[in-house]
Image: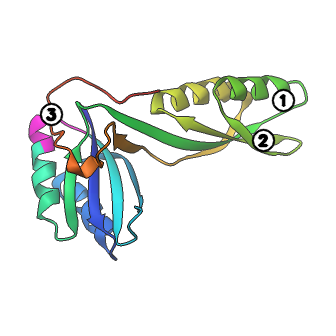
Amino acid sequence: MKHTISVLVENKFGVLARISGLFSGRGFNIDSLTVGPTHDESLSKMTIVTHGDDAVLEQIDKQLNKLVNVLKVTDLTGSGFVARELMLLKVRTRPKTRSEIVQLTDIFGGDVVHVEHEAMIIEITGAADKIDSFIRLMAPFGIIELARTGVAALARSAESTEKLDVRSAGTAAAADDN
C-alpha cells in the first residue's frame, strides 16, 4: 500500500541525510521525497511517499520519531489530504505539431514556459496520475527530458497537518486530486 507521510523537522544541517539514511538502512524505499522550509524558518516539512503494509509503516513511524530533529510524523494515508506535484517537461516540436502540443497543455491546465524552434518547455502541476497521463500523451512527440518535484501534501483541515491525529493507515481513502 502507498503511504504519504508528512514529517515536521528542525531546519538543521544533516536532517535530510539522516532521514534518507534511515530509509535505506532499513530497506524501506522512498518513492517520492520533497522538503522545504515552512512559514517558520526554523522548521522544514518533508513529504515522503513510500510503499508497505501497516507493519512497515509502523516501523517507519517509530524509527522516524527516534531521530532527534524530527518533531512530528503524520501519516496522511487514509485521511482527506491534498497532494500535488510539479513537472517541467521539454518536448520536441515541429511546426506541424506545435499547436497540438499547446492544445493538450491547455487541456491539462499547464503552461508553456519556454519556446524554441525545435523544443518547448511545459509546466504542469497536479496529482501524480494527471502528470503521468500527460507524459504518456507527450511521448509520441519526443520527450527530450523532464523533471518532477515529487509530492507535496497537506491535510484537509483548518488545523496544521501536525496537529491532526490522522494515523489511520488501514483505511482505503486516498489523496484528493481536485
Q: Residue at x 71, y 27 (%)?
A: 106
Nearer the observer: mark 2 or 3; the answer is 3
Q: Are marks 2 and 1 in contact (CB under 8 Å)?
A: yes
Q: Which residues are magenta?
A: 51-57
Q: Residue 27's x, y, as percent? A: 20, 51
Nearer the observer: mark 3 or 1; the answer is 3
Where does label 1 land, which residue? Answer: 98
Q: Are marks 2 and 3 in contact (CB under 8 Å)?
A: no
Q: CA distance from mark 2 to mark 1?
A: 9 Å
Q: Amino acid at mark 2?
A: Met
Work out whether 99 lies above or below 44. Answer: above
58 is within the stretch colored magenta: no
**Left or right: 133 with respect to 32?**
right
**Left or right: 38 with respect to 134?**
left
Q: Amino acid at mark 3?
A: Ser
Where does label 2 land, which residue? Answer: 120
Closest to the observer, 171 or 132: 171
Q: Secondary structure at mark 1?
A: helix
Closest to the observer, 74 or 129: 74
